[in-house]
Image (tube, rainbow, N blue to C red):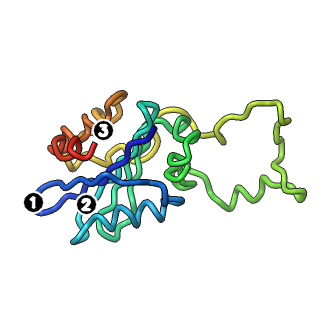
Amino acid sequence: MYFAALLARTEDGWEASDTELDDVESLADLMDLARGASTDDDTVIAFIEQEDAWFGLLRVDGEEDPRIFISDGAAAARSSYGEIMLTDELLGRDPDDLDDLVDLDGTEDGEPDDDEETADDGVPPGPIGDSLILDDLGMPESELLSLETDALSSIADALGCVDVLEAVR
């Protein structure tokens, strides 16, 4: 079960909206959804949480490149919405290097047999991304990295918008 919400920082404070991710198929779709919640290139944070397994934050500030933080990369890699946020750049991969791993027959070198279990494409467990994503908004890196359960409420509390978030929850 997922919970997703958008928080837009406006002149009047934070405004929250519950959001459906059914039509989100890529990071670009998620960024468009977040930017659509802003009226004046305000800061918008997209929250995605999957039943205390992992949470992700996508922050857009106007037309700047998005900033992403994921609490547990390996858990997110097993999730369709997590995979959207786990970009090559975030994982430190060069997309051109991936082409070198594919043989002419379309399989990867060292590809395991069908009965062997594989890791989540080498995605490490634990936090991935910009751990300073909320630092200027009132949640220091150390606090963000220590979150485990009910993370979104803790984040909203630090940002001063817990009531706004809980209203859409």
Q: Nearer the viewer, residue 128 or 27?
A: 27
Q: Give me the residue at 68% from left, 62% from top.
A: 96
Task: Pinpoint residue 33: horizontal percent, then vertical percent.
Answer: 38, 63
The answer to which of marks 1 and 3 sits earlier in the sequence is 1
Read off the residue under disc 2.
43
Q: Amino acid at mark 2?
A: Thr
2 and 7: which is toward the camera: 2
Pointer 1 or 2: first along the chain: 1
- Give the SS element for disc 1: loop
Q: Position of residue 152 (x, y in %)?
A: 30, 38
Tags 1 and 3 in contact by the CB under 8 Å rule? no
Question: In this view of the protein, which residue sits in the foreground, 73 or 169?
Answer: 169
Q: Residue, x 90% and y 56% (percent of image)?
A: 105
Mark 3 falls on what kind of element? Answer: helix
**Real-space CA distance between mark 3 and mark 2, rounded to the nearest whole angstrom:** 17 Å
Task: Please name the residue that numbered disc 3 is placed on.
Answer: 152
Judge left or right: residue 134 versus residue 138.
Answer: right
Mark 1 is surrounded, within 10 Å at the Cα level, by few (under 14), some (14 to 19) or many (20 or more) other residues, namely few
Return the x and y of residue 59 as percentages of the image width and height: 34, 55
The residue indicated by pointer 1 is 12
Give the distance between the C-alpha atoms of the residues marked 1 and 2, in whole angstroms.
13 Å
Q: Position of residue 106 (x, y in %)?
A: 84, 56
